[in-house]
Image (tube, helix red, strand yellow):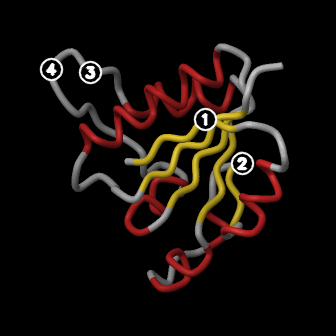
Amino acid sequence: MMSKAVISLTTGLEDPEKVTVAFLVAVGAAETGRETLMFLTKEAVRLALADTAVGVACDGCPPLQELCKRYEAAGGRYFVCPICFNAKQLEAGNLVGNAELQGTIPMWQWIGDDPATTFSY
């Protein structure tokens, strides 16, 4: 059994290259059959809002929208820090379909007792 993958992302579109790298890692994990979760905090919570994760970080980088679609198609999920999300006064009704407001305890419950590979950006 493959270990789960958890990608923690704190950066939003203020650093599109870092966001792109995090999504490339997440897409790679999800598309190779790992259960994959992105835990979004700080400015990254905005990436789980519909029509926000857009743009191309660099020449030759894939569009962020394409990476998001691939991530969702591969079964990738987002847990969005509710503290960060609410502090920014964002609207939960605008979350993409594979995102939910969940904090650290649900993240640990999702990981469970199985091994998990983690990345942090």
Classify mark 2: helix, strand or loop: loop
Q: Tell me how far mark 2 sits from mark 3, CA to CA.
A: 25 Å
Q: Tell me how far mark 3 sits from mark 4, CA to CA.
A: 6 Å
Sequence order check: which comes first, mark 3 or mark 1?
A: 3
110 lies above or below 54:
below
Contact check, label 3 and label 4, Cβ < 8 Å: yes
Question: Could you tell me which quadrant the N terminus lies in?
Answer: top right
53 lies above or below 65:
below
Within 10 Å of the Cα at label 4, are there few (<14), some (14-19), or many (20+) other Cα atoms?
Answer: few
Residue under label 2: 97
Residue visible at 47% across and 25% down? 66
Within 10 Å of the Cα at label 2, are there few (<14), some (14-19), or many (20+) other Cα atoms?
Answer: few
Residue under label 4: 59
Contact check, label 2 and label 3, Cβ < 8 Å: no
Classify mark 4: helix, strand or loop: loop
Question: Residue 5 location, x and y as percent?
Answer: 64, 35
Q: Tell me how far mark 4 sits from mark 2, CA to CA.
A: 29 Å
Sequence order check: which comes first, mark 4 or mark 2?
A: 4
Residue visible at 34% across and 34% down? 20
Q: What is the number of the mark on residue 61? A: 3
Q: What is the number of the mark on residue 69? A: none
